[in-house]
Amino acid sequence: MEEEIDLRPYVNALIRYWWIIALSALLGAGLAFLYATSQRDNYSATTIVAFLEPTQAVQFDPRFESVTSRTTILKSLPALSMSDDVIASLLGRLGDTEIEKATELKQHLSAESGSDLNLLYLRARSEDPNLSARLVNEWAEIFVTAANDIYASRGSSQIDFYVMQLQEAGERLNLAEQALVDFQGVNTLTLVTNELDSLTTLQARYAEYESSLTKLEDDIRAARAQLISQPGGVSGVAGEYTALALQSRVFQLQELLPVTVQLAAPEGATVQDQAQFFNSLEAIVIEMRPVVAEQLAELEPRILELQREKESLTARTTRLTSDRDLALETYKTLARKLDEERLTTNDITTGFRQVSRAAVPEMPVRANRTLAAVAGAAFGAVLSGLAIILYTWWRR
């Protein structure tokens, strides 16, 4: 079984030594009252810094987008206002005051965001009312300038950055354009393409001739077989017409080949003479075949070499053109962004602004003596009660 805790001895001890608790409360109240009375009066001056959002966004190029959250920026403003750079700048302006160190200056300042994050409350406290107003107003001026430089791009650093980037992009564009111009001065792509097209057309004609030779050879053999199968000793008009037609086809194919054809179809020849004529035609066709094959074999390596050279020249032209286009697009994008930054920097309707200058406070901020006495009494009573409980526990 769990052991039960008996609280009655502690309650009895608190009741028994109530007078100690009362004396401690009175002592705490008296000390707190004296401390509040001894405090010097301070004058507090307050000013408000507001973040004015733009009603229209200037964005010439949608590829440049802001990635910083506005809420994150506004939440960081109190810390920025108390940063070392801001405090050091403010301390530099206070040359004729008794405040000489940044740590001492920070004790006079406080910053907090309001319920609306767009508003930042800056406060300065000092025994001198004029100094408190001066502190908070100069602090607000320094902070507004720093915040606009950082978050609203009001400073010249952003413009200088884009000017430098634009100059570098212009140099890259000039180099890319000059490289393309120099290459075009020695680029033989058009000549290679024309020669390749000519050889490809010639190769296609030779391939077509090769097919025509095969078909012509088949037709000669068919005509000869038909001639031999005819009765009688004369081939007739049909045979002579067939011989002339085949001879004409051989002459047409001779135009592209270095083969001389000298034949004449016999008129009124016998079947044997006509058959011999067909044999001569077939011999000529067979003689043409290796010539066509030789021409095709000679064209193939040249065509392949021209294709390789054309692809190489095309790839280099494409690469140089792409480099030029990319450099040009980069230059145009940076030029748009520079114009955008210049417009944004000159726009004073947005960004951080001090709503109003703080006036010299007329009434000091005094410590609440009654509240201090009540707090001191409560602290003394609680402290003495804990001491009595510990004493009782130690005795047991």
Image: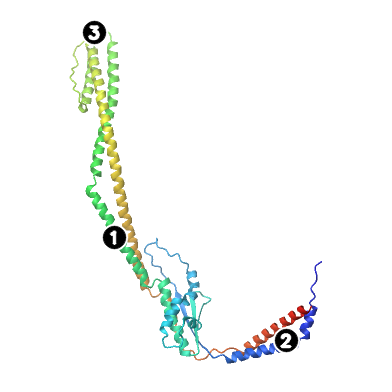
**Precedes in sequence: disc 2 or disc 1:** 2
At mark 1, the secondary structure is: helix
Q: Residue furthest front?
A: 395
Badge 1 crowding class, 10 Å Cα cut-off, few under 14, some 14 to 19, many 20 or more, is some
Label 3: which residue? 233
Which image quarter is the N terminus in?
bottom right
Mark 3 vs mark 1, CA separation in Å: 92 Å
Coordinates of residue 269 in the picture (x, y in percent): 20, 11
Kindly identify the amino acid type of the residue bearing the numbered disc 3. Answer: Gly
Left-right relation of 339 to 269: right
Kindly identify the amino acid type of the residue bearing the numbered disc 2. Answer: Ile
Kindly identify the amino acid type of the residue bearing the numbered disc 1. Answer: Glu
Closest to the camera, between mark 2 and mark 1, is 2
User: Which quadrant holds residue 37?
Assistant: bottom right
Badge 3 crowding class, 10 Å Cα cut-off, few under 14, some 14 to 19, many 20 or more, is few
Label 2: which residue? 21
At mark 3, the secondary structure is: loop
Label 1: which residue? 171
Q: Residue at x 32, y 66 (%)?
A: 163
Mark 3 vs mark 2, CA separation in Å: 157 Å
- Comparing 292 with 304, the one in front is 304
Image mark count: 3
Mark 2 vs mark 1, CA separation in Å: 85 Å
State how the image is colored: rainbow
